[in-house]
Image: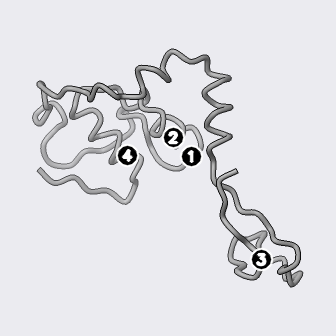
């Protein structure tokens, strides 16, 4: 089986469905879908070729370290807070800034450093 898509969120949603999970129960798919980065709702995805039901992996077992089991029990406000804390954002190094304002379009290389903050 080969999976492919220009929409990586949709691709993850289809793969998640194939292994028997609800795509929106996977936090990366859920948050990407909510942020409009792709389609995470399997109902809105066109699958060409075999249906997900035809290729379902019925004996798939999640690893013992599956974090969804832990994160799923965390209140929504806390999981969003944690996600926000782990998001990588650009930081402007003022001494290197040339004042070109290109960084507002994220094409500036003069003073941006990507950091986990």
Q: Earlier in the sequence, mark 2 or mark 4?
A: 4
Label 3 vs label 4: CA separation? 34 Å
**What's the mark number on residue 111?**
3
Q: Residue at x 46, y 20 (%)?
A: 70
Density class for disc 2 (Cα within 10 Å; few <14, some 14-19, many ≥20) is some
14 vs 51, left or right, is: right
The residue where tag 1 is placed is 36
**What's the mark number on residue 10?**
4
Q: Residue at x 63, y 54 (%)?
A: 88
Q: Is residue 56 above or below residue 76?
A: below
Percent across and percent down for residue 82 are 63, 33
Percent across and percent down for residue 39 are 44, 43
Q: Is residue 96 above or below residue 10?
A: below
Residue contact at pointers 1 and 3, CB within 8 angstroms: no
Density class for disc 1 (Cα within 10 Å; few <14, some 14-19, many ≥20) is few
89 vs 30, left or right, is: right
- Callout in the foreground (2, 3): 3
């Amino acid at each position: 089986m080969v999976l492919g898509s220009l929409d990586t969120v949709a691709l993850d949603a289809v793969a998640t469905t194939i292994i028997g999970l609800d795509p929106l129960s996977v936090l990366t798919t859920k948050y990407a879908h909510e942020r409009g980065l792709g389609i995470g709702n399997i109902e809105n995805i066109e699958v060409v070729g075999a249906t997900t039901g035809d290729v379902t992996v019925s004996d798939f077992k999640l690893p013992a370290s599956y974090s969804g089991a832990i994160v799923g029990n965390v209140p929504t406000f806390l999981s969003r807070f944690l996600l926000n804390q782990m998001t990588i954002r650009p930081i402007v190094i003022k001494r290197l800034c040339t004042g070109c304002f290109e960084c507002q379009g994220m094409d500036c290389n003069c003073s941006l450093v990507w950091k986990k903050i």
